[in-house]
Image (cartoon, helix red, strand yellow):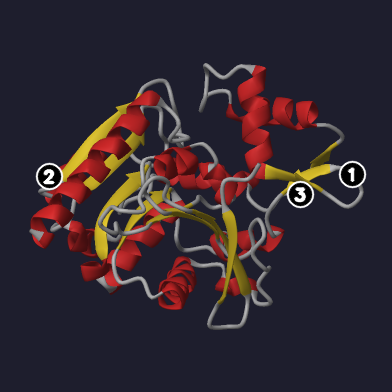
């Protein structure tokens, strides 16, 4: 039985977008908390949070796990050049307006973390706290090159086991301790069953078009946007083997943000699933700090 409702809203350019809406459990008599927005990575979707979101919902938080445009159950864009972070920010802002939300917590993985930083830059007063999962203002060129090598390349498999084994071949260094069952679970987050019965990637292959444009080899530099997170609790989660977020960049982020805490997930690359014990604990600490700050303000 699904623990969430399907939520739909419209973008400024008239795309129907989708999120999974997990209601807070046991929170009928509690003071309202800001909702948590879960923003997935470049090729991911709302299913990336199918373990985390129910856990947070059970703890009394409303969780909105988004499908960015061109992913999952959100519509594919007519203009592939709209698959860029600033447009994703506008899509999230349209959701906030649709729901009448003026305060929220963001959990952003990779691209979702970039969107989180840009949201903070656009309206930092709305953000009550943030989790930046394996991403920062500087993205390592080697990691960008690796992602450019696979994003937008269509492939299909006859069974989930075949898809899982293909994932394992490419990502063995990212999750070296995964068993076959873990790879199957990851495949079911990334892929869907097509109308022909094949297992295929669950995103518009055209998301690669703006990502592959030349001249951006060093990745985005958004230290100014990150600066807008100085006044809120921030959890930085980094995979020990990450080729996207370097240890040096993560350390500088902590130095720049007075309320930031860095957690390193051992034996993991880009990006932690956020189901790891270290990541779960970091998110719980972040939400405890958000709650304490909220209650102090109310009091």
The residue that mark 1 highlights is 197
Find residue 216 and name its label.
Answer: none
Q: Quadrant of the N terminus?
A: top right
Instruction: Point out the frontmost of discs 2 and 1.
Output: 1
Frontmost residue, 91 versus 212: 91
In the image, residue 13 above or below residue 135: below
Horizontal placement of 214 versus 240: left or right? right
Q: Residue at left 75%, top 32%?
A: 163
In the image, residue 88 above or below residue 234: below
**Position of residue 19 measured from the top left corner of the image (x, y, whole percent):** 56, 60
Q: Residue at left 65%, top 77%?
A: 79
Residue 97 falls in which quadrant of the image?
bottom left
The alpha-carbon separation of the residues under discs 1 and 3 comes to 15 Å
Residue 16 falls in which quadrant of the image?
bottom right
Q: What crowding class fits label 2: few (fewer than 14 Cα within 10 Å), some (14-19), or many (20 or more)?
A: few
The residue that mark 2 highlights is 255
Instruction: Point out the frontmost of discs 1 and 3.
Output: 1
Whether residue 63 appears in this view of the structure is yes
**Position of residue 284 measured from the top left corner of the image (x, y, whole percent):** 29, 37
Horizontal placement of 153 versus 96: left or right? right
Residue occupying the far bottom of the picture: 13
The residue that mark 3 highlights is 154
Q: Earlier in the sequence, mark 2 or mark 1?
A: 1
In the image, residue 234 above or below residue 162: below
Horizontal placement of 287 versus 193: left or right? left
């Amino acid at each position: 039985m699904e623990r969430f409702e399907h939520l739909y809203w419209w973008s400024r350019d008239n795309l129907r977008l989708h999120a999974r809406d997990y209601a807070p459990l046991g929170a009928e008599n509690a003071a309202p908390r800001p909702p948590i927005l879960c923003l997935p990575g470049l090729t991911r979707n709302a299913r990336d949070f199918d373990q985390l979101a129910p856990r947070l919902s059970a703890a009394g938080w409303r969780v909105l796990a988004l499908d960015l445009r061109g992913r999952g159950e959100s519509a594919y864009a007519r203009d592939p050049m709209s698959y860029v972070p600033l447009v994703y920010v506008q899509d999230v802002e349209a959701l906030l307006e649709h729901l009448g939300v003026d305060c929220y917590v963001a959990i952003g993985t990779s691209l979702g973390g970039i969107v989180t930083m840009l949201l903070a830059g656009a309206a930092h007063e709305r953000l009550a706290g943030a989790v930046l999962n394996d991403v920062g203002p500087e993205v390592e060129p080697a990691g960008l090159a690796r992602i450019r090598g696979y994003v937008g390349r269509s492939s299909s498999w006859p069974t989930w086991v075949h898809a899982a084994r293909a994932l394992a071949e490419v990502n063995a260094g990212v999750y070296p301790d995964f068993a076959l069952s873990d790879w199957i679970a990851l495949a079911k987050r990334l892929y869907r069953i097509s109308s022909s019965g094949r297992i295929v990637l669950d995103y518009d292959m055209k998301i690669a078009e703006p990502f592959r444009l030349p001249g951006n080899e060093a990745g985005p530099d958004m230290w100014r946007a990150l600066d807008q997170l100085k006044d809120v609790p921030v959890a930085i989660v980094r995979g020990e083997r990450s080729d996207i977020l370097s240890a040096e960049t993560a350390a500088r982020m902590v130095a720049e943000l007075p309320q930031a805490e860095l957690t390193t997930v051992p034996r993991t690359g880009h990006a932690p699933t956020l189901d790891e014990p270290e990541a779960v604990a970091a998110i719980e600490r972040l939400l405890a700090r958000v709650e304490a700050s909220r209650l102090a303000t109310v009091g």
